[in-house]
Amino acid sequence: MTNLVKLDLYDNHNYKTKSFLIRVSWYFVSTIFFSTLLIFPSSFKSSLLRSFGAKIGGNVIIKPNVNIKYPWNLTVGNNTWIGEGVWIDNLTDINIGSNVCFKLNTDWFVEIYDLDGVVSYVTKYGGKTDEHTGSDKLVLLGV
C-alpha cells in the first residue's frame, strides 16, 4: 500500500488572508450574527458580509446558524438562498452563482492543496439556474 498524501510536501503559499484584527473582528461578528439561532434580517447580514469584503448580489437570503470562514473570499449572485446550518469553509475564493439554493446542513469545503507541487483549488460553485444541494450534504474540492 502506498502513501498517496505526503504532508511534508504541503505548501500553503497561495493562502491569502486578512490581518489578525480583521479576522478577530469577523470571528465576533460571525458568532453574534451568523452562527446563532437568533434571527437577523438577511439584508443586514448581507451588509455585514459586504463590509468584510464579500460581493453579495440582490435578494440573497441567509438563514440562521450559517458559518462562513472568510467573507473576503466570498461572492454570491442574485436570488440565492443559504439555508440553516450551511458551512462555507472558504480558504480561497468561492463564487456562488445566481439562483442557487443551499439547503439545510450543507458543508462546502473550498481549500487550497499543494501536494507534490500541484496546486488544486476550487474557484467557482453554482452559477446554473435553479441549482440546489440537498440536506445534510458534504461538497468537497472538485465537485
Image (spheres, grey):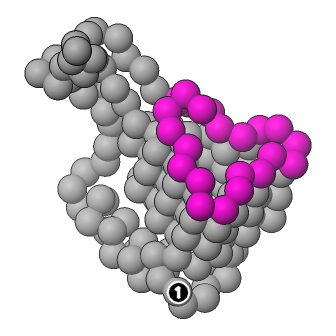
Q: Residue furthest left?
A: 8
Viewer-closest of 50 and 97: 97
The structure residue drawn at horizontal position 46% and vertical position 76%, both measured from the top left corner, is: 35
The structure residue drawn at horizontal position 37% and vertical position 30%, both measured from the top left corner, is: 112
Q: Residue furthest right?
A: 129
Q: Is residue 36 above or below residue 142?
A: below
Where residue 47 appears, as percent x and y from the top left, is 60, 68
The magenta stretch is 122-143
**Visible in this render: residue 51?**
no
Viewer-closest of 5 and 94: 5
The structure residue drawn at horizontal position 42% and vertical position 72%, both measured from the top left corner, is: 30
Where residue 83 appears, as percent x and y from the top left, is 66, 68
**Visible in this render: residue 62?**
yes
Dominant SS in magenta: loop
Q: Is residue 118 left or right of residue 123?
A: left
Q: Is residue 80 above or below residue 5?
A: below
Helix, strand or loop status at disc 1 = loop
Q: Is residue 88 above or below residue 17?
A: below
Q: Is residue 63 left or right of residue 14?
A: right
Q: Is residue 35 left or right of residue 116?
A: right
Where residue 53 appears, as percent x and y from the top left, is 50, 52
Q: Is residue 114 magenta?
A: no
Q: Is residue 64 above or below residue 132?
A: below
Amino acid type for the residue under numbered disc 1: Leu
Query: What residue does disc 1 label?
Result: 37
Q: Is residue 129 magenta?
A: yes
Quadrant the N terminus occupies: top left
Viewer-closest of 92 and 2: 2
The structure residue drawn at horizontal position 34% and vertical position 26%, both measured from the top left corner, is: 113
Q: Residue furthest bottom?
A: 38
Quadrant the C terminus occupies: top right
